[in-house]
Amino acid sequence: MTEQIFIPKAYKNTIEKGSYTWSSPSNIALVKYWGKKEHQIPENPSISFTLNECKTITKLSFSKKEDNTGFSFEVFLDNEKKDDFKPKIETFFKRIESYLPFLKTYHFKIETSNTFPHSSGIASSASGMSALALCLMSIEKALNPDITNEDFIQKTSFLARLGSGSACRSLEGDLVVWGKHDEIDRSSDLFGVKYPFEVHQNFKNYNDTILLVDKGEKQVSSTVGHNLMHNHPFAKERFKQAHSNLSTLINVFKTGDLKAFIEIVESEALTLHAMMMTSMPHFILMKPNTLEIINKIWNFRHKTGSNVCFTLDAGANVHVLYPENETEIVLEFIKNELVAFCQKGEYINDKIGFGAKLL
Ligand code: DP6
């Protein structure tokens, strides 16, 4: 399959104006996407839990304009005009223009808000770009109503990827794979697909409590971060490791082996940070409190036999992952021992979710 299949045939309908609102979640990677080639093609396959509470809600209003010369849009975050969001959206529009030929024929008003605080250090690019891609695809569906639900999701994921790689994993629940993997038939570098195999009851309603260790702006932009993998001395091994970790996870999901799950998930998080620490230039994105939390989690697990574990994004915040049947005991542990290491004691209780919704 190539990108060509996403170039639409002539549209059947014409529409003057309208609006669509979508809510789209964030996701947390278990096997990390870190390193990409040109055109947002990942260097390795990744898999993520779709989240339930951390979402972006985007309303896209559109009206036909006189000329078709350039992109015309305005962006609002929480009702406030946000011109500093425009370059990223302009780049996104340029990348997807050939797949959505109507883009230059409308003026767009993009009104967006997040259910999580903007300055929480939680990346909003996955939920934000997927919500915008969904709104744009709703326009395409109105212009061409024959598009099937399956094709709608696939093309939306394809477009979202061109906005932000991880965004292509945010449309459906509850586990999504992005990137070609030998054992996952329909997996693709071009879009995310719902994880197609058996998932043990142990992983249903899995919890993710996000501890906000550092709510500041990202120290390393994702583009800079991914580029660090070019000519990285350990890149080849790392990309191979992601393939084998995903292979192992297939069996883990089937059997419900939580101990094996923890091993892989924590190793993936630490490897992501190890890659950053061993690249040129190098970065340490963990903070002292990140390490305090990791050690507390290890001690707690050792003492109690709990199946709580952690994962990290490209930042200092810690995602604490634990099965549904440990909700009470782990929440108690978080309140008693971990909240002290969060900035202003802030954290967000989230869990596996079911994907994006048209509102
Ligand atoms: C560490 O999707 O934000 O969260 O494609 O440049 O927008 P761009 O990168 P982005 O990278 C996410 C990296 C990660 C791991 C992951 O989500 O798999």
Image (cartoon, rainbow, N blue to C red):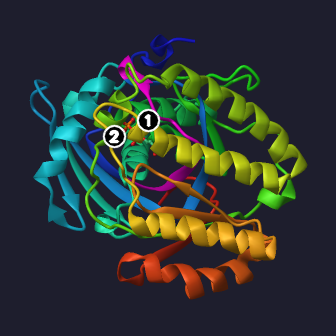
Marks 1 & 2, CB-CB < 8 Å contact: yes
Work out whether residue 122 or residue 72 is closer to the camera in this orientation and state it: 122
Q: Which of 24 and 213 is in front in this view?
A: 213
Q: Does the residue labelled 2 lie within 8 Å of ligand 1?
A: yes
- Expressed as whole percent of the image width and height from the top left, the position of residue 212 reads 42, 70
Q: Label 2 belongs to which residue? A: 222
Q: Is mark 1 within 8 Å of ligand 1?
A: yes
- Residue placed at 35% from the left, 67% from the top? 214
Image-based side of 283 in relation to 137, left or right = left
Relative height, residue 163 to residue 209 (above, below): above
- Image quadrant for the N terminus? top right
The residue that appears at 50% across and 63% down in the rendered structure is 318
Indicate the secondary structure of the residue bearing disc 2.
helix
Q: In this view, does 89 lie to the left or right of 256?
A: left
Q: Give the range drawn in magenta.
A: 21-39
Q: Which amino acid does label 1 sit on?
A: Gly
Q: In the drawing, what numbered circle is on residue 165?
A: 1
> Relative to residue 356, is residue 342 drawn left or right?
left
The reply to whether the magenta stretch includes residue 300 is no
> x%, y% of residue 227?
33, 28
Is the residue marked by circle 1 packed among few (<14), some (14-19), or many (20+) residues within 10 Å?
Answer: many
Give the quarter the ligand 1 occupies: top left
> Which amino acid type is marked by label 2?
Ser
Q: Is residue 172 visible?
A: yes
Point out the residue furthest to the right here.
255
Q: Which residue: 36% across, 77% down?
A: 343
Q: In terms of sequence position, does the residue under pointer 1 or pointer 2 come before the other?
A: 1
Nearer to me, 330 or 270: 270
